[in-house]
Image (cartoon, rainbow, N blue to C red):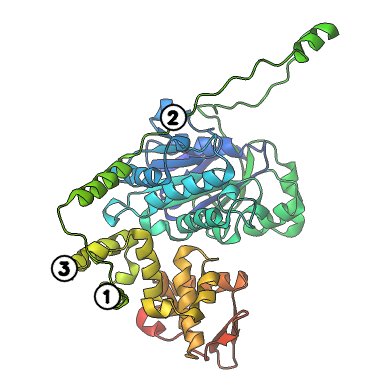
């Protein structure tokens, strides 16, 4: 049964419907300047779909907390939780199918990015058994997926951009339907915006934004001027969940209201000039010493980790001597073998990291390596190196330091692909095929592998060239390493085109 969400009326007076099941299989991009009715559109969509599907809203201004009273959303005030706690909250929200609002109000830009990335990571990394359908709405998406670096640290930007890229590029397999809203298309990272299949474009005035909106809707450039004439609440719609041709519509009313309403004009109070002078220029109150803010109590995960550490400290075992360099090298070699065995399993390249890590930990315990098992963050780095064909010793070689620095400029899930190409270039081997790149990325899609190469090239890290026979050569910028020509279509007949 098709579930149709009523968004309002078309310009012809007919009901404007949105196919919810089609939206869950695709993604939605909403664009409109401040005052265009963008947040009102998101509220209408959330209210109409609330009875049908789980939702979560990344809310930088606290506008959507009013959904809690009417529709039962759980409001999570991000300021009161650690990043680890928010990641755990994201996982539990999916497991128990609870709709949530992540309220980021009161945090600066960097902490908003870090906490949103942690929460989205929890939604994304949950086990396959809990991949239930979910709408993930990100308001003011340009804050979390900026097109250029801003005043925040590179680490925070990479964490946030990586989480948004995962949501829009890889979320569909996990049941996550990304809905992103932005005031400025030009400020939103192109690789995030490009994954949307449905579009709702509202009023905008800048030429660059009008041109991008017209391109996304398949309109001619001369028609882009029409975006200036749209009224508040009017949008141009296009996409498989909305309309196969650009369609004008007006968003209908909502049951709930934003907590922060639009300021209204009101007359100034009547006061004599001398009275105003006395009030405004009165002596300031005496300074008071602010009581120190009580540190927040640690979350459950912190308490569990502290208890585990305490148990290890009181265990009546003799202290071990520091391992020698030979012992460390042997342990690294054994863990590399364990990781290789994990990745040798069928479809290991396409399983979520959490599942791979659990299997890795079990195998390490069997091998007697329980005391040196790396944490999840270190396992991610090991996995990136392993998918690139690098052992621990090779990855620590001085020649790879520049490669690691350059790889860190990319989202985490793309770094293994870059390192794999770098290894082929350093050893003058043929350029990896699209199928090999897709496997290293954890995808079956050859088209996605080609888009991935294009993205890395746009970041200024590589240069791709095709010779007269269609073979591909990749050169690493500044390192002067180049692969030998390789057939991009190798193994394509075996894996199939997607």
- Report helix, strand or loop for mark 3: helix
Residue 295 spot, x, y in % from top left:
42, 33
Front one among 88 and 92: 88
Which of the image's four quarters has the C terminus? bottom left
| Residue receiving disc 2 | 294
Q: Which mark is on residue 366?
A: 3
Whether residue 161 can be seen here: yes
Q: Secondary structure at mark 2?
A: loop
What residue is rendered at 33% in x and 45% in y? 94
**SS for dot 1:** helix
C-alpha span from label 2 to label 3: 44 Å
Quadrant housing residue 339? bottom left
Query: Which label sits in the foreground, 2 or 3?
Result: 2
Q: Earlier in the sequence, mark 1 or mark 3?
A: 1
Around disc 3, counting alpha carbons within 10 Å, would you say few (fewer than 14), some (14 to 19), or many (20 or more)?
few
**Which sits in the foreground, 371 or 313?**
313
Residue marked by disc 1: 327
């Amino acid at each position: 049964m098709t579930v149709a969400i009523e968004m309002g009326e078309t310009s012809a007076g007919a009901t404007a419907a949105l196919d919810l099941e089609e939206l869950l299989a695709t993604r939605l991009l909403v664009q409109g300047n401040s005052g265009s009715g963008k947040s009102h559109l998101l509220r209408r969509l959330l209210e109409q779909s609330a009875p049908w599907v789980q939702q979560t809203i990344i809310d930088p201004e606290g506008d959507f907390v009013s959904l809690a009273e009417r529709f039962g959303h759980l409001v999570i005030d991000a300021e009161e939780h650690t990043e680890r706690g928010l990641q755990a909250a994201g996982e539990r929200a999916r497991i128990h199918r609870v709709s949530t609002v992540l309220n980021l109000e009161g945090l600066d830009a960097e902490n908003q990015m870090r906490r949103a990335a942690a929460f989205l990571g929890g939604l994304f990394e949950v086990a396959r058994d809990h991949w239930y359908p979910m709408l993930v709405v990100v308001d003011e998406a340009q804050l979390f997926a900026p097109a250029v670096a801003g005043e925040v640290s590179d680490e925070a930007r990479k964490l946030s951009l990586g989480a948004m890229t995962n949501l829009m590029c890889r979320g569909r397999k996990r049941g996550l339907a990304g809905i992103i809203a932005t005031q400025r298309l030009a400020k939103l990272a192109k690789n995030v915006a490009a994954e949307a299949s449905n579009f709702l474009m509202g009023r905008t005035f800048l030429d660059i934004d009008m041109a991008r909106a017209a391109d996304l809707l398949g309109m001619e450039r001369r028609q882009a001027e029409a975006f200036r004439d749209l009224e508040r609440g009017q949008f141009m719609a296009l996409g498989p969940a909305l309309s196969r041709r650009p369609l004008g519509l007006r968003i209908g009313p909502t049951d709930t209201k934003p907590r922060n309403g639009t300021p209204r004009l009101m007359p100034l109070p009547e006061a004599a000039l001398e009275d105003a002078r006395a009030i405004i220029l009165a002596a300031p109150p005496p300074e008071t010493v602010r009581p120190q803010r009580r540190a927040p109590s640690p979350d459950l995960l912190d308490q569990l980790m502290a208890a585990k550490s305490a148990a290890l400290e009181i265990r009546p075992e003799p202290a071990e001597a520091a391992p020698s360099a030979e012992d460390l090298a042997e342990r690294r070699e054994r863990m590399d073998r364990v990781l290789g065995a994990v990745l040798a399993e069928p479809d290991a390249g396409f399983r979520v990291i959490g599942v791979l890590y659990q299997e890795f930990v079990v195998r390490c315990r069997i091998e007697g390596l329980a005391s040196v098992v790396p944490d999840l963050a270190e396992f991610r780095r090991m996995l990136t190196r392993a998918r690139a064909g690098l052992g621990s010793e090779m990855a620590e070689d001085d020649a790879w330091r520049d490669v690691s620095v350059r790889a860190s400029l990319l989202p985490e899930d793309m770094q293994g692909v870059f390192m794999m190409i770098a290894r082929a270039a350093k050893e003058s081997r043929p350029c990896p095929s699209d199928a090999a790149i897709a496997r290293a990325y954890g995808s079956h899609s050859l088209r996605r592998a080609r888009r991935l190469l294009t993205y890395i090239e746009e970041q200024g890290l590589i240069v791709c060239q095709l010779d007269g026979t269609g073979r591909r050569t990749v050169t690493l910028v500044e390192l002067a390493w180049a692969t030998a020509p390789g057939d991009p279509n190798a193994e394509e007949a075996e894996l199939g085109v997607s």
